[in-house]
Amino acid sequence: MIRAFAVVAAFVAIFGAGVAEARDYPVSLTYAAPASVTQGAPTIMLTSVRDNRGEGHHLYELGSIRGGYGNPLKTLVTEQAVAVVVAQAIRDALAARSLGAEAGVHRLEVRITRFDCNQLFPKEAHIELSFRLLDASTDAVLYEGTARANQAGGGAGMGIFTPIEPLRALTNQVMNDGIDRMLDDPGLRAALAAPISAPIPAADQAPVVESAAETPSAEPAPEVAPTP
């Protein structure tokens, strides 16, 4: 009898009761630079970071630990909007490379097109950042690209008993990896080193920054400007 009860309890814990609602767990994500980074000149102003993950993504939500049926049990959410968190991480990454400036000759615009995590049995996290480097005086696009990072970790899920920290740490790492790939992109570094009077053409016309109304989401996508 006791053994049968234990089996049922384990089943409910792993697969999750069908009527149970997911709980939100606020988590903190911070940037930590790699052991070695290539330094540069302080010329970049981070002027916008937009959450363009689209419909189905709450502005604070990262992802969930799930039950055996795929039902969310524990949902990781950021304490501030995801765009705000990523913007601060990018500022810290620019500072670690001596690239950031309050008044510089370059502007950096970033769109978060993917940033999520999930745990059913293995853990996984993904990020995709679309970015543009512009001449601050003319708004000419000097370089544009996309940085992607993916992380996966083993370990069987334990349903409602699965701890939050391993998935949070994996998500933090994938954010850092994506930002590192963006700022260490060879094309971006070449554009930074080129004379500002000779921009690298990237489009036939100057691109227009998306407005919040153009973002396909139930809530306006926040545009985050760097703080002084």
Image (tube, rainbow, N blue to C red):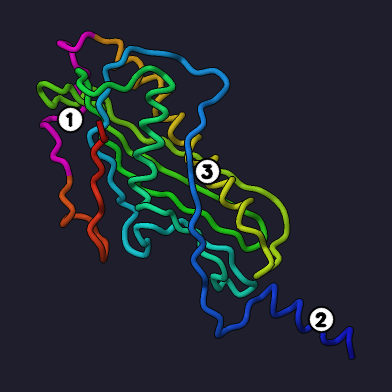
Q: Using the image as rendered, state which of residue 70 and residue 48 is in the foreground.
A: 48
Label 3 Cα crowd, 10 Å radius (few <14 / some 14-19 / many 20+) = some
Report the Cα–Cα distance between label 2 and label 1. Answer: 62 Å
Residue 198 shown in magenta: yes
Residue at the far front: name it. Answer: 228
Tell me the residue at 49%/66% (across/down): 24
The amino acid marked with disc number 3 is Asn
The amino acid marked with disc number 2 is Val
Q: Quadrant of residue 2?
A: bottom right
Element type where label 1 sits in the image: loop
Give the numbered dot on residue 172: 3
Give the image location of residue 86, x and y in percent.
Answer: 38, 42
Query: Which of labels 2 and 1 is toward the front?
Result: 2
Give, as a single range, the part of the protein colored magenta: 195-209
Identify the residue under disc 1. 203
Q: Give the mark nearest the N terminus, 2 or 1.
A: 2
Q: Using the image as rendered, state which of residue 133 and residue 5 is in the foreground.
A: 5
Tell me the residue at 34%/39% (across/down): 87
